[in-house]
Image (cartoon, grey):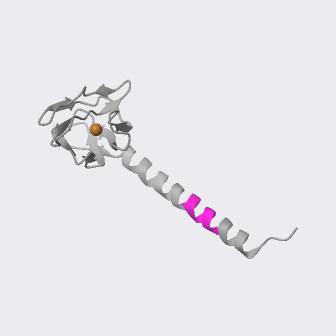
């Protein structure tokens, strides 16, 4: 069986993609294992122009994640089993305080393309 040069190139490209994914996986694991020191704080996620900003956020257990609808249409932020902001009218807010570490992908169920992630890391115990 002959392997065409194009096939080799495609194979190499797939290998590079797989390596990239591995590197990304290692990075995100390192972040999820990290710990944050200090007092709990509030992180704001803005809903505007049918997207979440920031799209990726790192918080510590016990911090507050607060979604604020700064758009002209209704949105929500939902991760089944963890939180559901309900439909937020323009100007409305909703807070969630994570109690476990992990990577939490969530979305707006009204707009399929509105997706974002919160990575919850441990809080360093006080000395
Ligand atoms: Cu939405």
Image position of 73 (left or right of 15): left
Q: Which of 80/91 is in front?
A: 91
Question: Which secondary structure dominates the residues rendered in magenta?
Answer: helix
Decide: is 52 above or below 94: below
User: What residue is shown at x 30% (from left), y 27% (from top)?
Assistant: 83
Image position of 126 (left or right of 111): left
Which stretch is magenta? Answer: 12-19
Q: Is residue 31 visible?
A: yes
Q: Is residue 123 visible?
A: no
Image coords of residue 78 (percent x, y): 32, 31
Q: Which of 35/25 is in front?
A: 25
Task: Give the image quadrant in which the ligand numbered 1 is located.
Answer: top left
- Identify the residue at the far front of this view: 73
User: What residue is shown at x 19% (from left), y 31% (from top)?
Assistant: 88
Image coords of residue 54 (percent x, y): 25, 49
The answer to which quarter of the image holds residue 70 is top left
The answer to which quarter of the image holds residue 37 is top left
Residue 70: say if magenta: no
The answer to which quarter of the image holds residue 35 is top left
């Amino acid at each position: 069986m002959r392997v065409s040069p194009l096939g080799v190139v495609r194979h190499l490209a797939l290998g590079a993609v797989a390596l990239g994914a591995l590197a990304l996986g290692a990075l995100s694991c390192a972040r999820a294992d990290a710990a944050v020191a200090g007092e709990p704080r509030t992180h704001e996620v803005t809903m505007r122009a049918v997207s979440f900003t920031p799209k990726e956020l790192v918080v510590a257990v016990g911090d507050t994640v607060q979604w604020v609808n700064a758009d002209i249409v209704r949105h929500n932020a939902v991760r089944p089993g963890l939180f559901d902001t309900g439909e937020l009218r323009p100007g409305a807010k909703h807070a969630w305080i994570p109690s476990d570490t992990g990577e939490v992908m969530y979305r707006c169920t009204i707009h399929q393309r509105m997706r974002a992630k919160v990575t919850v890391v441990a809080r360093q115990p006080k000395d």
